[in-house]
Amino acid sequence: MEKLLACHERRAVIPRTTEMNQARRFALIIPALNAERTIGRLLDEAQRYIPADGVIVVDDGSSDATAAVAESKGCAVIRHERNRGKGAALQTGFDAAVKRTIDAVLTMDADLQHDPHSIPDFLLVFASGKFDVLIGSRLHDKRGMPMHRVLSNTITTSLVKARTGARIADSQSGFRLIGKRVLEEVRLESTGFEAETEFLIKAAARGFRFGSIPIRTIYAGEQSHMTHAATTMNFIRVLFHDY
């Protein structure tokens, strides 16, 4: 069952971050494409909570210095020679992570739309043992979110909830914490953005438990991928696929 934490509850968990990292082991997976402008800052902030040797950056065929910047921060970098899509990059990261002695992985986008200072919130709630997958929800407070994104996220989340029967708060959020056992049982077939929907459908079908963490909405005028016709069609295909 989903639990959505109040803002005052979220702030209270931050001082316990060191304790949480001692008690459990986590990996952070960041799929990245031409993110040299943002990846350095993201890694600097994220490494306050996840050490550099726990971070895996999957460079999905970048033509800029994304890989070099990530390597300079001491992270493990896996490179796709050509762009294969976000789903493929995530699965590459998952494959690398499950070989490690970890309890769970966090996933974040490389464009600074996810606030690294929310990481402790995920770690503490996961430690309760009540959830297998935690999703960062932007829909608890839509201020700052462009209207087209509010509409697309609300519609797609409603459709995914109807498809799975699970209380999923924000199906399009890439800021997630996923238990290792889930990764061992769920493998992505889709290679694009629709893979994040596929993952939720498969995890729900296997009875894994979902929870939510309120996260801050951060946008700087980027275009929503869900407005692209091909991405929308891929979402629909995955939604009605019989997994």
Image (tube, helix red, strand yellow):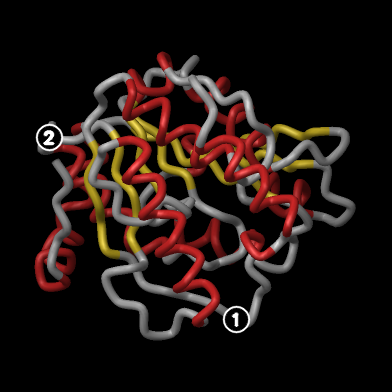
Of helix, strand and loop, which one carries label 2? loop
Gap in Å between the C-alphas at discs 2 and 1?
Answer: 34 Å
Residue 148: image location, x then y, percent: 55, 76
Residue at numbered disc 2: 130
Q: Give whichever of discs 2 and 1 has the lower sequence position.
A: 2
- Position of 63 with respect to 53 (left or right) is right
230 or 120: which is nearer to us? 230
> Which residue: 33% across, 68% down?
139
Q: Position of residue 204 (x, y in %)?
A: 32, 29
Q: Secondary structure at mark 1?
A: loop
Q: Are marks 2 and 1 in contact (CB under 8 Å)?
A: no
Q: Quadrant of the N terminus?
A: top left
Residue 192 vertical placement versus 93 (above, below): below
Seen at 29% across and 76% down, the residue is: 141
32 or 210, which lies in front? 210
Residue 47 in view of the camera: no
| Residue 120 in view here | yes
Q: What's the residue type where badge 1 is placed?
A: Ala
Is the residue marked by circle 1 packed among few (<14), some (14-19), or many (20+) residues within 10 Å? few
Residue drawn at the location 62% of the way across and 35% of the way down: 76
Residues packed near mark 2 inside 10 Å, few (<14), some (14 to 19) or many (20 plus): some
Q: Residue furthest bottom?
A: 143
Report the residue marked by disc 1.
Answer: 220
Residue 24: x and y, percent?
Answer: 24, 31
**Position of residue 224 in the picture relative to residue 103 (left or right):** right
Closer to us: 144 or 201: 201
Where residue 227 appears, as percent x and y from the top left, is: 66, 65
Question: Does 114 appear above or below 30?
Answer: below
